[in-house]
Image: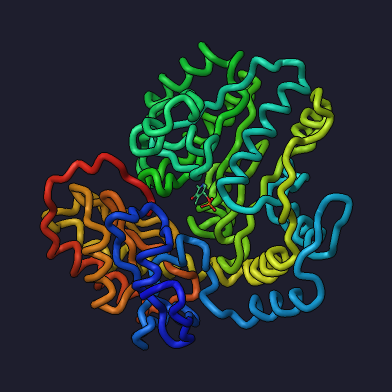
């Protein structure tokens, strides 16, 4: 294949792709296999060879209402005709205003200001910049460190990398460009077990020793996603909120993966009944149709930022508040507001608990855990993503394992039968797999 091969609507030029296109976390020397997808509808992806497979990933946890949803598609089409994009500097539009109103209504009371960002990682960058500028506005410019926990994942840009798990993440390979942050142990008590207050001792000591340098705590509430697929106890968050108040530290919650129903509550912080000072949203915000994220903050934070020497918040991307993305988000949130997700997620949770339980006894499975619409088999070693991917496609499903995890986060609209196909496939693959004891140097959510 060369560069002049004409595109063909029916087929995907896999060979050209392999030669010229980067994929997430891949090598150009040794490209992992990719599958051409030509369309998707409901919970099924249609491959270039005509085969339809059941999606267990919601396209990296975003596509919660399924693909080609008529409401979201219509909203995007209509918006494209009316106003696809206009700069947000000095201009505003109905989709941005309406989306902000919806987000303020849906989230906890304290969150009243909305910054629309282009992607999750950028929403995290924005949250960190807000925290730093807040303390500048409070005349405490020495508060510049972010306290976080191990096993976290917050994105791939530089500030986001600085708060990802320091071992599994990307700290070592970019040297001093990745800021050194403060890492407490990962929350330890599991979601469904009893809370052990002992686990807070290091965290408390870190607050005590460093609070004068700490601008904010940044954490994924309840579920640590790409950093470890772990569900931790709500009491941990309650304690964290208390410590933040006690030591005058902002609390940033990264709900990019957990937001909009995934863990069984609309937002994961509701499990703990706490409020964030700054909240990051993304992934499912547009129902997974277009990239969009949001960083929300309180009046207090907004005032501090605006009182800083800069006098303004120092961020403003070209495509900020893109109307197409806002229109998709409004349509998706209207679907969320119809509340069907509650029963759907509860059913998915119950069915996964039932159907995945048997995997506890498999030789290579060390843990089976389910929370909301997330089902995880933790394996005793790193899995071969490409190899397992191939087995899953043969079984008619799209599941993309990483590190030690074979997991699913299906669209909420999945049927019982489709979900059984996913859990069956997980069990088949997990029971047959023979794992080399391979300590992969670098582990990512790719
Ligand atoms: C995916 C994710 C991000 C990064 O979002 P992108 O849109 O991929 O930049 C940040 N935080 C969490 C918790 C995520 O799951």
Left/right of residue 126 with respect to residue 345 in the rendered view: right
Front in this rendered view, residue 441 or 423:
441
> Going by the picture, which residue comes out furthest to the top?
209
For residue 394, what is the image quadrant? bottom left
For residue 348, what is the image quadrant? bottom left
Residue 316 appears in the figure: yes
Percent across and percent down for residue 343 are 51, 70
> Going by the picture, which residue comes out furthest to the right?
90
Residue positioned 53% across, 42% down in the render: 157
- Looking at the picture, the colour scheme in use is rainbow
For residue 135, what is the image quadrant? top right
Percent across and percent down for residue 40 are 48, 80
Left/right of residue 178 with respect to residue 115 in the rendered view: left
Left/right of residue 441 with respect to residue 327 in the rendered view: left
Front in this rendered view, residue 7 or 229:
7
Q: Please state the total of marks drawn on the protein image.
A: 0
Residue positioned 55% across, 27% down in the render: 146
Residue positioned 42% across, 56% down in the render: 24
Left/right of residue 188 with respect to residue 388 in the rendered view: right
Percent across and percent down for residue 300 are 78, 32
Q: Is residue 26 above or below residue 399?
A: above
Q: Is residue 174 above or below residue 60?
A: above
Front in this rendered view, residue 336 or 160:
160
Q: Is the N terminus in the top left, top right, bottom left or bottom right quadrant? A: bottom left
Q: Is the C terminus in the top left, top right, bottom left or bottom right quadrant? A: bottom left
Percent across and percent down for residue 94 are 84, 64
Q: Is residue 302 above or below residue 22?
A: above
Q: Is residue 239 above or below residue 21?
A: above
Residue positioned 36% across, 45% down in the render: 228
Residue 221 appears in the figure: no
């Amino acid at each position: 294949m060369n560069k002049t091969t004409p595109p063909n609507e029916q087929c995907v030029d896999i060979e050209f792709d392999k030669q010229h296109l980067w994929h997430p976390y891949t090598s150009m020397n040794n490209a992992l296999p990719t599958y051409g997808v030509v369309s998707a509808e409901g919970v099924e992806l249609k491959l270039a060879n005509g085969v339809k497979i059941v999606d267990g990933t919601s396209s990296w946890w975003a596509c919660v209402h399924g693909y080609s949803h008529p409401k979201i598609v219509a909203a995007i089409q209509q918006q494209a005709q009316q106003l696809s994009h206009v700069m947000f500097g000095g201009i505003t539009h109905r989709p941005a205003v309406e989306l902000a109103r919806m987000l303020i209504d849906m989230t906890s009371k304290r969150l009243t200001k909305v910054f629309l960002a282009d992607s999750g990682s950028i929403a995290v960058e924005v949250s960190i910049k807000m925290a730093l500028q807040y303390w500048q506005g409070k005349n405490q410019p020495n508060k510049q460190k972010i306290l976080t926990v191990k096993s976290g994942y917050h994105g791939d840009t530089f500030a986001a990398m600085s708060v990802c798990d320091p071992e599994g993440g990307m700290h070592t390979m970019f040297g001093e460009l990745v800021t050194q942050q403060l890492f407490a142990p990962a929350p330890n008590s599991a979601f469904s077990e009893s809370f052990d207050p002992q686990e807070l001792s290091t965290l408390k000591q870190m607050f005590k020793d460093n609070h004068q340098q700490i601008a904010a705590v940044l954490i994924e509430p309840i579920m640590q996603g790409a950093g470890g697929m772990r569900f931790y106890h709500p009491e941990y968050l309650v304690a964290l909120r208390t410590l933040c108040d006690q030591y005058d530290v902002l609390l940033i919650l990264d709900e990019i993966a957990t937001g909009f129903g995934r863990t069984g509550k609309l937002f994961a912080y509701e499990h703990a009944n706490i409020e964030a000072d700054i909240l990051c949203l993304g992934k499912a915000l547009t129902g997974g149709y277009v990239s969009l994220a949001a960083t929300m903050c309180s009046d207090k934070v907004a005032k501090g930022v605006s009182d800083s020497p800069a006098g303004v918040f120092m961020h403003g991307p070209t495509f900020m508040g893109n109307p197409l993305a806002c229109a998709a988000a409004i349509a998706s949130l209207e679907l969320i507001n119809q509340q069907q997700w509650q029963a759907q997620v509860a059913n998915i949770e119950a069915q996964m608990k039932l159907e995945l339980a048997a995997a506890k006894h498999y030789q290579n499975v060390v843990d089976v855990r389910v929370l909301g619409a997330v089902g995880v088999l933790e394996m005793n070693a790193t899995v071969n993503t490409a190899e397992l991917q191939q087995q899953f496609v043969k079984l008619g499903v799209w599941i993309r394992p990483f590190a030690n995890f074979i997991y699913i986060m299906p669209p909420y609209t999945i049927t019982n039968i489709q979900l059984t196909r996913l859990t069956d496939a997980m069990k088949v693959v997990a029971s047959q797999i023979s794992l080399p004891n391979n300590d992969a140097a670098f582990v990512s959510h790719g």
